[in-house]
Image (tube, rainbow, N blue to C red):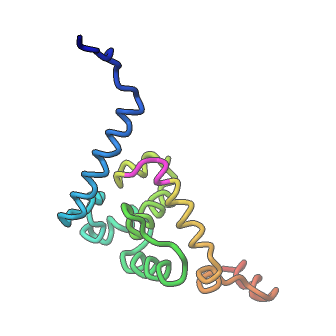
Amino acid sequence: MLNLIPYRAPSTAFYYFAWRLAEEARRERRELSGISQRVFFRRTEDPMDISESEFKKRYRLSKEAFKFLCQELRSKTNLRASKRISLELKVLCVLSFYATGSYQRLVGMGKHLGQTSVSKCVTQVTEALNDPSITDTFIKFPTSRTERDAIKQK
């Protein structure tokens, strides 16, 4: 006589571990074949392609000043590009936010960024601009009474 074992449905844990094993096998195959995981970069227009007057209108800064600002931030602060957002895009996003005073969501729509990304960019770039190595170089306050009076007269 045959002794039959009753059927029992696989548990959730079984499916979870099966999925993990399959995912691990896929990852190993990718590594062995030399295929790396894709990194997606945002498609945006090159701001250097627009005219100088349009650039100034959008960002309240010349192209040359923008390049200089990015170079200074890169060399003197810890502001860096992330995997998906370049340093230049961060600075442009923040300059647009400063120039228009618009909502972060609207600024981000023009750069294909979400509101939270714009918020992080504003925080990072503002902190970098307030770094003593930047402020001490570019912001000079009058030190004497005569200097302050001369500025008031202007």
Residue at 30% across, 57% down = 42
Q: Which residue is rendered at x = 45% and y = 67% of the image?
A: 91
On the question of residue 57 being in view, the answer is: no
Whether the magenta-drawn stretch holds residue 114 is answered as yes
| Left or right, 70 with reference to 41 | right
Q: Quadrant of residue 53?
A: bottom left
In the image, is 60 to the left or to the right of 124? left
Question: Is 76 in the magenta?
Answer: no
135 or 125, which lies in front?
Answer: 125
Total number of numbered discs in the rendering: 0
Q: What is the quadrant of the C terminus in the image?
A: bottom right
Residue 44 picture quarter: bottom left
Q: Position of residue 81 (x, y in %)?
A: 42, 69
Rendering coords of residue 2 (x, y %): 24, 13
- Please state which of residues 68 and 152 is positioned toward the viewer in this rendering: 68
The residue segment tinted magenta is 113-118
Residue 87 seen in render:
yes
Vertical relation: 65 (above or below) 110: below
- Residue at 50%, 78% in the rendered image: 73
* Residue under the point 31% across and 17% down: 5
Nearer the observer, 3 or 84: 3
